[in-house]
Image (tube, helix red, strand yellow):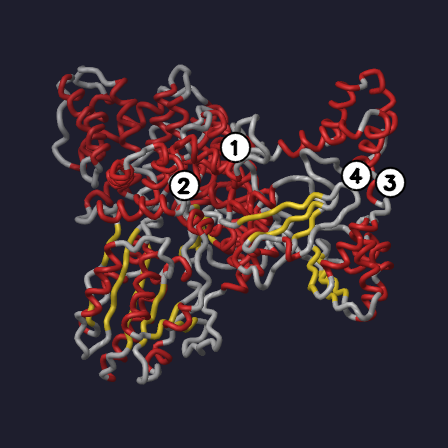
Amino acid sequence: MCELIRKQVKTRRQKSLPAFEQVIKDKSGAELYQTALRWLQGNVSQHAVNAVIGDAVRGARKPGANSAFPEDGEPAEWHLPQGTMQLAELVNRFPDDFPGPILTTNFDPLLSLAIRAAGGRSQRRIVDGDGNIGREAESDPGTRTVAHLHGYWRASDTLHTPAQLTALRPRLKASLQSILRKKTLVVVAYSGWDDVFTSALAEILLDEDTPLDVLWCFRENDPQLVATRYARLIERMQPAIARGVFRAYGGVDCHHIFGEVMAEQTSSPVPSEPLDSPLPGWECLDTGSLSVLAPLSEGEARRYYDGAVPEWRHASSDLVPRREAATLIAERRSQLEGDSASLQLIRAAGGEGKTTLLLQAAVHAARNEDVRILWRPSPKFCLSPEHVISLSADFQWLIVADDAENLVKAISESARLLRQAGRANVDFLLAARDSDWKASGGDREGWAQWLQYQPDLVLRGISAIDARAVVDAWSRAGGLRKLAAEDDTERRSVLLLEAVNDQVAQEGLHREDGSFFGGLLAVRFGEAGLRAHVREFLAQLRAAPIASSDKSLAEALLYVAACHGAGIKGLDEKVLSDLLGVPRDWVRSRVVRPLGEEAAAVSGGDRVFTRHSQVAAAVLLEAEAALDVDLADIWAQIVKQTVATHREVHVAVFAPIVHASSTLQARLPQQMPQARRKAIAISAGVAAVNAKTEWLGTVVDLGRTYRNANELNHAVQLFRRELKQAPAKTDFNYIIRGYWCEWGVCEASLHREGASQFGAWLQGLSLSDRLSPAILTAEQIKLNCAGIGVAFGRLATSAADCPFARAYRATIDIARRVPLDARAEGYFDRYERAADKLHIPHPKDLSEAVVWFTEGINAIGESISDEELLNLVHPGNVSFDALHTMLKRPDRSA
């Protein structure tokens, strides 16, 4: 703001700039703001003050928005803060409970725009002098009145200085007193300036016969701090405090309070007489519960289309299209026999719409079959078979659970008990990520022996009928986004169908991603549009602090996106809560749920994901490009906290995060500069070594990370330096052979004379008896032989007595005695052809192959002049008895 004021001084009164700088010297905060504007008004003009405010307000417009626009322009052109949007939706949806008017001392149009964006209508009252706000009878039905008490950003003066704010404005004061009588006044994000509003309020509260209740919300949570910081306000309100009509609340976050109030208004279920649930922690719903849910607004529908987490209100709304699979589930239920319970499972990757389908199918059953739904609101709640078998026989029950993979054993035992008891009034409707369900053994249970087991519904892609229904829904709610450029409705459906099918066809890093949501992102945003959308909600989330934390929702999303954007299956909720300083039991309500409402993240089991890997990639790219975030530091924090949390409790995806560094460079978004991906990977590797000091595996990871980043000297120095400490590591016997192997690869990759021999020598030692009894695996043999074969191939000649030639053939023979993947087969096929060209003989058996291999390794050792390496093992003393023994075993895959 000060820079904008300085700009006006330079433009209108250049010679006075030194005097201005002297006046504001050593000022800060509110004092700087008021001093600068008071000087500008007194020494330049009120017009200059208004121009500063106009420039400041225009700063809230989105990048790329037209700089020339009529009046306030369109809501989509402005950054609308989360708290502002939540307040707008609250007054739109509950006009009887929150009739207004809304009084504000802000100059900007964001609140009126937010009301429009949420599907409502607003009318504005601007009071920049003395005047009245208007009576309730003067308002049009269905409109929300927003009164700007200190003026407006355009076509109005704006009030800033103490002289302006404290000037007598009797008509406005009388108008305020008239409006506030018989009201409950909620004051949020207002410090109680010594202005006309505070004066009017104080006078009204002095009148004991005037019914007015004031709820004043302070951001601070420390009563002593509030008493000190707002001493003048509290002094003026003492009579009202004594009467109990002025109540103060601390720790209120204006970015979340209206959303929390709205959640209380619309929480599910909300029947007039809530149903008691017979399952602890689970919710009980029926058709009555669902019928009283508040209708979904178009603004909420658009956020759902962008990926907001579905709830019962979405599943009950006509604004959300009902997919074909929901009809199929209903048809299957209508054909159930009455002699046993049933189970229907929906399996899909995240982002295929399984949660919406689950809830829609449950809503249909409640409305059409008169069932009572038992819904698990969080995966943390378990299921007791004893409670299931005790469910009342007076009702038909439908047990509905998302993330059902952690209920497999409980459901199978419940099904067995229901079968034994001959109970047919309990059905199960479940959803789970496909990979999680399989990992938990759900596909190996004998469901059909206890239940009427319906074939699993596996969601992947979308039908033409569903595509048409989805696009029609987007169109009705104004949510077409990029597709709005297409005039033909059928063409829009085809584009969505093609985009989803393209996602289905893709194989690779992010196979856990949902094709439906991926197609949605492609047709509604495109890459550039998605990044712009992500930039917008990151800015909003950055301004949204997390309760009881010094971090924002944007930082929470960055932690999650850092993992998902690198192909890791989520971030453990416990690690996320510890990173943010949020109590673990509250991380869902304070972090995951708000992120879900913004279509940014979703939980699955005990992990948190972004809505799609494309969203994760866009978050990471925008964080570094637009928000000046250092992802190298973010990754170091994640690794460090994952290790710390895991020392206390089990952490999901612990190993993928701690060992992530060696693959990060390749897995991070390729649009990110290579130098940044290298730096992030190295930062994660260093953090793992420092955090998990008892592990040798993290050292190997860091060495490989340096190699992938072409920092070969750092890799070699690391391996040489850490070797002395290696025997003390807890994983020594499991990792030491891999340590020597990777060290050898790094040495061989150096651009210096004899590098190939150095590498082969070290890789040979990694298979030798020198490291016994360290575990020797088939995988280790494959990797070492692939590297050693390169060196032997370069050294081999057609001479009959060439030890390197015989060792080359022996290396191929040894490698082919263990399982090889297609890539490795390609390597050794190539080596085989090269050996054939040199007419190298084949060993007659395994024993001879090991002898030739031993001679070749020792011969390489004799050619090495590096004293540090030679001091490790003297050439000629290397043996491979353990390798020989392992290869003789019938089963060599271990």
Question: Is residue 581 shown left or right of residue 128?
Answer: left
> At label 1, which amino acid type do we have?
Arg
Residue 663, given in percent of the width and then of the height, sits at: 40, 36
> At label 4, which amino acid type do we have?
His
Residue sitting at x 71%, y 28%:
51
Element at label 3: helix
Q: Which residue is mark 1?
A: 721
Residue 188, given in percent of the width and then of the height, sits at: 69, 54
In the figure, 312 relative to 540: above or below? below
| Cβ atoms under marks 1 and 3 closer than 8 Å | no
Residue 893 vs residue 530, the one in the foreground = 530
Element at label 1: helix
Residue 116 vs residue 404, the one in the foreground = 116
Label 3 to label 2, Cα distance in Å? 77 Å
> At label 2, which amino acid type do we have?
Ile
Label 4 to label 2, Cα distance in Å? 70 Å
Camera-near label (3 vs 2) is 3
Label 1 to label 2, Cα distance in Å? 14 Å
Camera-near label (4 vs 2) is 4
Element at label 4: loop
State the mark number for residue 163. 3
Label 1 to label 3, Cα distance in Å? 71 Å
Q: Which residue is mark 2?
A: 736
Residue sitting at x 75%, y 35%:
157
> At label 3, which amino acid type do we have?
Ala
